Image (cartoon, rainbow, N blue to C red):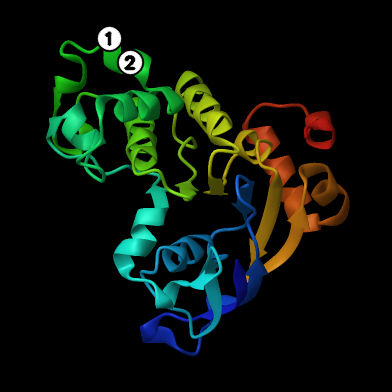
């Protein structure tokens, strides 16, 4: 649960990036965070991983303030998949088990299946022993993202943070990622910074963040009817995704 969060970066104490932000995420719930550039979405994710502490307010994980936990405890319970996943030169397996070196074959197989990564790895010349270059050279964008999701899942996090991973992918890769997220719903709590409505529509609830504040919260249909900022976002994104305007009213 996030309660009355206020944050300003150390070099700019007079400028609050987040101001009185409060919301809760239920176990197994998927919440999408949308808003314009500079709204504070990435900063919120930084605070959730405790790269910074807020000036006031609190973030509770299972009822415990993050500041009362060791950093390792926080990072063990929260998985993060960035927009551009960090992969290093080595085997696919070494990249996969980076955060869970003692993972069993069964656990690896389960994580890869959930991330819809099993098929492409099975097609690799040496399976998980296939070597890739620095940054995952040799893999497509969608394959990198699915491997990164599997890596995050292998640590069995209670909360998964996704910095929208599909905005630069082709349609087929995006569909694979969307299937992965769908499989994860209910297994862990998911917070996703969403730039595409195809992702937003998967969420159980949507938070509209602007000027460092939560401006609205609700379902797609509720926000289309009650929040001008979200309705504008939806119209722009549906147009970008090639969907007719009526979809913005009927998609749920």
Quarter of the rendering containing residue 183? top right
The residue that appears at 74% across and 52% down in the rendered structure is 230
Residue 246 placement (x, y as % from top left): 84, 30
Q: Residue at x 51, y 84 (%)?
A: 15
**In the rendered image, which quarter contains the C terminus?**
top right
Q: How many marks?
A: 2
Q: Position of residue 107 (x, y in %)?
A: 33, 30
Image quadrant where one finds the N terminus:
bottom right
Q: Looking at the image, which residue is at 62% across and 74% down? A: 3
Q: Nearer the viewer, residue 202 or 102?
A: 102
Q: Is residue 32 above or below residue 94?
A: below
* Left or right side of 82 for 28: right
User: How far is the residue under mark 1 from the one under mark 2?
Assistant: 5 Å
What label does residue 123 carry, if any? Answer: 1
**Local SS, label 1:** loop
Cβ atoms under marks 1 and 2 closer than 8 Å: yes
What residue lies at 40% left-to-right and 49% top-to-bottom?
A: 79
**In the image, is 122 to the left or to the right of 8?**
left
- The numbered dot on residue 239 is none
Residue 248 horizontal/vertical position (percent): 79, 36
Query: Is label 2 in a helix, a strand or a loop?
Result: helix
Can you say whether 150 is above or below 74 in the image? above
Q: For mark 1, does the 10 Å Cα neighbourhood hold few (<14), some (14 to 19), or many (20 or more) residues?
A: few
Q: Position of residue 68 (x, y in %)?
A: 41, 77
Residue 73 visible here:
yes
Circle 2 residues within 10 Å: few <14, some 14–19, many ≥20? some
- Is residue 96 toward the left or the right of residue 134 in the image? right
User: In this rendering, does residue 211 appear at all?
Assistant: no
State the residue position of label 2. Answer: 120
């Amino acid at each position: 649960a996030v309660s009355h969060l206020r944050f300003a970066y150390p070099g700019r104490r007079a400028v609050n990036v987040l101001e009185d932000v409060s919301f809760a995420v239920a176990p197994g719930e998927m919440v999408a965070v949308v808003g314009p550039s500079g709204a504070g979405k990435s900063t919120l994710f930084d605070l959730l991983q405790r790269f910074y502490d807020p000036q006031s307010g609190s973030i509770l994980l299972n009822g415990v303030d993050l500041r009362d936990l060791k950093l390792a405890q926080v990072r063990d319970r929260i998985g993060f998949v960035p927009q551009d996943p960090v992969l290093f030169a080595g085997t696919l397996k070494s990249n996969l088990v980076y955060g869970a070196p003692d993972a069993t074959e069964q656990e690896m197989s389960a994580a890869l299946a959930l991330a819809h990564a099993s098929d492409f790895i099975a097609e690799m010349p040496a399976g998980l022993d296939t070597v890739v270059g620095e940054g995952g050279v040799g893999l497509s964008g969608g394959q990198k993202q699915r491997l990164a999701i599997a890596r995050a899942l292998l640590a069995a996090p209670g909360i998964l943070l996704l910095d929208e991973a599909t905005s630069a992918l082709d349609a087929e890769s995006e569909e694979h990622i969307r299937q992965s997220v769908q499989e994860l719903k209910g297994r862990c709590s998911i917070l996703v910074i969403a730039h595409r409505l195809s992702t937003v529509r998967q969420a159980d609830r949507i938070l509209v963040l602007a000027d460092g504040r939560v401006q609205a919260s609700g379902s797609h249909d509720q926000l289309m009817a009650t929040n001008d900022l979200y309705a504008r976002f939806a119209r722009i994104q549906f147009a970008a995704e090639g969907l007719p305007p009526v979809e913005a009213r009927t998609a749920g």
